[in-house]
Image (tube, coloured by chain):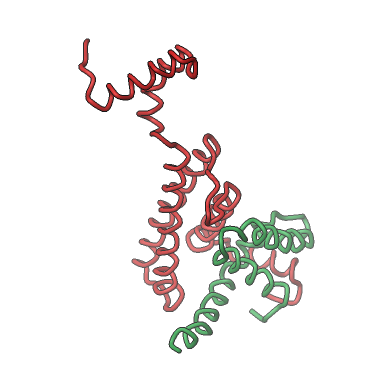
Chain colours: A green, B red
């Protein structure tokens, strides 16, 4: 799938929600769901934010793999 | 049936009687008190907080294992089966904890774990479960991605 800034922003927000400190979690969730809601409104008929999240999961796996590859050299330092 | 009270139960009983005597506890509360202690424990909120912390620790460990087995490499069918069963257990435990938090609340804590953050974590692992183990049919996925993001899929 080609890189799309909106998709990248959703993946980043999802990753943030998974990895952020507890105190930041409600805000991270709010940010992710705002992006999902915005995207869901573009579908016809309208869909749920969770549907966008689920539709993107395969791509999110790739995002996580890339993230891991980027972080691996940093850990080795 | 008469059951002899153990040492600890005698102490609790004496404590309850004392609280009734000085008017801190009503007679009805006194009747329930030993059962409350048995079922909820001495400090229910603190106990629940400890359970939530353990749940978070399990999720943290799970994420590390998930990274290695599911993301660094292509997962085997065995990886998928283990991942599925562990995630189901974490979700079930999370649902149970959310239910208890709803009943008795969480104490303030240094990690800033709140009912909202626990719910957000549970929601995130449920979404991961769907992503790995209940994937959206390809046709529906492509239709959604095409409608929502136009230039992709």
Percent of width and height locating residue B76: 37, 71
- Looking at the image, residue B41 lies above or below residue B7: below
Give residue A62's position: percent from left, percent from top: 55, 77
Direction from residue B112 to residue B3 in the image, left or right: left
Relative image position of residue B86 (x, y in whole percent) = 39, 57
**Residue at the spot 63% in from the left edge and 79% down from the top edge:** A1
The residue at the point 73 percent across, 64 percent down is A35
Residue at 73 percent of width and 72 percent of height? A6
The foreground one among B17 and B37 is: B17
Q: Is residue B123 above or below residue B45?
A: below
Q: Quadrant of residue B9?
A: top left
Question: In the image, is B112 to the left or to the right of A75?
Answer: right
| Residue for point 48% across, 40% down | B45
Q: How many marks?
A: 0
Q: Residue furthest front?
A: B22
The x and y percentages for residue B106 are 53, 43
Between B113 and B61, which is closer to the camera in this rendering?
B113
Rendered image quadrant of residue B40: top left
Which quarter shows the C terminus of chain A?
bottom left
Whether B68 is drawn above or below B59: the answer is below
Using the rendered view, name the quadrant where residue B105 is placed: top right
Q: For this rendering, which residue is in front, A14 or B132? A: A14
């Amino acid at each position: 799938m080609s890189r799309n800034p909106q998709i990248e922003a959703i993946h980043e927000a999802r990753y943030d929600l998974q990895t952020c400190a507890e105190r930041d979690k409600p805000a991270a969730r709010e940010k992710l769901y705002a992006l999902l809601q915005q995207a869901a409104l573009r579908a016809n008929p309208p869909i749920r934010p969770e549907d966008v999240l689920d539709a993107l999961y395969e791509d999110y796996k790739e995002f996580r793999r890339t993230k891991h590859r980027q972080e691996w050299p940093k850990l080795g330092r | 049936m008469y059951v002899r009270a153990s040492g600890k139960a005698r102490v609790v009983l004496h404590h309850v009687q004392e609280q009734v005597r000085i008017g801190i506890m009503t007679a009805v509360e006194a009747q329930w008190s030993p059962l409350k202690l048995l079922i909820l424990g001495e400090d229910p909120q603190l106990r629940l907080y400890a359970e939530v912390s353990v749940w978070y620790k399990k999720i943290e460990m799970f994420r590390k294992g998930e990274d290695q087995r599911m993301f660094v490499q292509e997962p085997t069918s065995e990886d998928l089966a283990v991942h599925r069963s562990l995630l189901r257990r974490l979700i079930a435990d999370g649902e149970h904890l959310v239910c208890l938090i709803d009943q008795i609340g969480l104490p303030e804590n240094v990690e800033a774990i709140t009912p909202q953050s626990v719910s957000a974590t549970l929601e995130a692992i449920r979404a991961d479960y769907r992503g790995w183990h209940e994937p959206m049919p390809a046709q529906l996925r492509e239709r959604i991605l095409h409608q929502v993001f136009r230039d992709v899929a």
